[in-house]
Amino acid sequence: MGMGLGRRYALVVATLVVVYWLVPAGLGRNVVEILVGLVAMSALMLAAHNDRAHTTAWHMFGIGGTLILAGDCVQAWYRWSGSPQPYPSLGDLGYLLGYGALSLGLVLLQRGRPLTVSGVLDTAVVTVAGGLVLWIALGDHLGPPGELVWFTSLAYPVMNMLLLALIVWIITSPVAVLDAVISRWLALSIAALLIADTVFGLSDSSLNFQDRLFSMGYLTMYAGWTGAGVRAASRPEPPAPSQETLLSPLWLLGMYAALLVVPTILLIDYLNDHQDSHLPLAVASFLLSVLVPARMWLSMRQLVASTRQSDAFRDDLAHQAAHDHLTDLPNRAYLMELLSAQMHRARRSGSEVALLFVDLDFFKRVNDQLGHAAGDEVLRTTADRMKSVLRAGDVLARQGGDEFVVLIDPVPTPAELIDIADRLVKAVSVPIMTAAGKASIGASVGIALARDGQIDAEQLLQDADLAAYRAKSNGRGRAEIFDQALRSELEARAKLEHDIRTGLSGGEFELHYQPVMSVATGRLRSYEALIRWRHPQRGLVPPDEFIPTAEESLLICEIGRWVLGRATKQLTEWTREDPAGHHDVTVAVNISARHLASKSLVDEVRSALHDSGLDARRLVLEITETVLMDEPTADAHLRDLRALGVTVSLDDFGTGYTSIGQLQKLQVDTLKIDQSFLRSDDPATQALVALMITAAHAFNLDVVAEGVETEEQLQRLSRIGCELAQGYYLGRPLPAREARIASEPAR
Ligand code: C2E
Ligand code: CA
Ligand code: CA
């Protein structure tokens, strides 16, 4: 089917038309015309067969076409027989019934099409204008009213008008329900029919048209049906729901043509010195002057509405591309755009640009414990809260995950920036009630300033991010300002990490040992292993200068592993050398939070004990209380370690948040009271130390007082019943060999 079929039909119709022009006027032409009609009928039957959705419509067309063909046959018979042809004849009956069937077919084709005001108006405009032309053209040929001749002559233009209205109805449809090619072929066929009928109606008037000319109209009509039928038979894709094209040039042209009908007729009348038909002209003119503006107004309204709609749609798209879906805040890409623009402006005006990087604390915990829906809720609430504490000109953006960025404009003083950051932290830190439960988060804020226009947007963001990172590692819930000093500190840190790594493999680290004594007897009870770095250039480096940096990466675990191995071996060695003096002495190793949180610690302790042959009871692990707060896994690991027989000591007690009441629940055996308590002469502080010791004893914990530097401090500890002490007064941390010698006199 399809192409091949279409070509074959086109060839047949074209051949017949050529033949029509070649044969002399008379019966031959009538026969050719009927043949063309038969070809069209076959195409319509094919369409009825293949286009299942419109079978009845195509049948109607077939019936209409056949009736018209029958009319043609009657006409031809009159011609052939030479008998005078009456008017109206049986042929006219065939034609008029045929037009009725065609009209019905057009209606059926449009089944399912919604009725629109603009469609009705379009149809009305064309019908009025076309109707006027027909009326004027045929007005003189009607004959006496009431008779059959009058009736027939009137029926033709009325049927024509009906067909015209229907075809206009089809082609101006804002919603395509019919394949566009089919409706164009149909339009061609109906237009040809209307023109031919009009010309035929005028044929015996003064204009005296050629027989062949109007016959061409009928041939074109058949060709149109053939085209429509073949197209429908090829089963075209159903039309896509099309967007209404508003104020298209063709449509405007149609409206103008309709408006021009009346003045044109007036002009022709004037030129022909013909002065009748004032009434129909006035009526048509009146109708058109109402219909056309109404239709125009409707179009304008639709145009405005659709423009508004597409504007809104475009705005919506732009908004979506630039904003985060969850919080509706500007996203990273949009933020970078805003930031670059502001930095360009600042560079020109010599002003500053400030950026706040807000990194939420403990957000991961919310997601883990309350679920992702609660996490989303928390992010939204947090965004709202932050927005409420910012000033109108400031931009809050979501950087991604649990990170937000605030672009401050105009830039206030550094003090005010800190103030804004504090407000943000405070706003975020208020617990949030979600559907899944209460969520408590915090925020660490990094502040970065671009002062001289030397850095770009990307760099500024990175600076703020680093400052936030520092705020986080300095204890969270706070703000840090990024500045040059901070930047060089970061560079130094990177170098330090590298040096520690090479130092570890190069054997640059060593342990010093500080004794822990019994207050009552002065006997050695334990050694605390304290790390030192014998740096090739810097000499002996104390732990405060590298442990904090090591704690920011997994380096601290490597260090811890090394210390564990070294310290346990050392104590075993001492015990072998001097069993009497050392058999009940323990060694304490400091374990950092990150190391305690790591899965491998328990195994590492086990293998250190195994490798050294040291009894687990002689190993003390010193941990700080912050570990217990921050690392949820710490508690479980401590349990496993104590199950091994290892003792756990809570270091620097009193500096953190652990209350005495909580001691009972902790997985520890010993408390080390922080040095700061010993140093204070304040009676209240001394009373507090006494209280801590009493409480610790009540919970069956041993107590070590750290930082004993004087005889007086030792006496005081003895008075309040503290059993263990450590400090410069009792012994400084010394290298292994010296520590061992130093401990000898104590025996
Ligand atoms: P810390 O665990 O509280 O260790 C006690 C610190 O106090 C030691 O400093 C020690 O030399 C010092 N100290 C002892 N007695 C006195 C005294 O009477 N007066 C004064 N003013 N100070 C005294 P050090 O060795 O510099 O260690 C500092 C910190 O470094 C340690 O504090 C510990 O937190 C950490 N650290 C040391 N070695 C290691 C290690 O091997 N691993 C880990 N993770 N941390 C370690
Ligand atoms: Ca310690
Ligand atoms: Ca300590």
Image: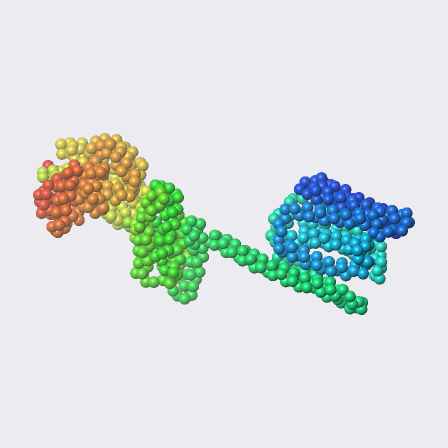
- Where the N terminus falls, by quadrant? top right
**Residue 236: image location, x then y, percent:** 67, 44
Instruction: Give left or right: position of 544 versus 386.
Output: left
In this rendering, does residue 59 appear at all? yes
Rendered residue at 20%/44% (across/down): 659
On the rendering, which quadrant does ligand 1 occupy?
Answer: top left
**Left or right: 250 as drawn, with respect to 618:** right
- Give percent across and percent down for residue 611: 26, 32
> Residue at left 27%, top 43%?
629
Question: In terms of depth relative to the viewer, which is nearer, 438 or 711?
Answer: 438
Residues 333 and 233: in front is 233
Q: Is residue 243 left or right of residue 621?
A: right
| Quarter-of-image position of residue 289 | bottom right
Q: Residue at x 73, y 60 (%)?
A: 132
Q: Is residue 326 left or right of residue 604?
A: right
Q: Residue furthest right?
A: 82
Residue 37 location (% of width, % of height): 80, 46
Q: How many marks?
A: 0
Rendered location of residue 519, percent (x, y): 11, 40
Please name whichever residue, 517 or 347, is drawn nearer the observer in this view of the structure: 347
Q: Is residue 13 above or below residue 487?
A: above
Q: Is residue 36 visible?
A: no
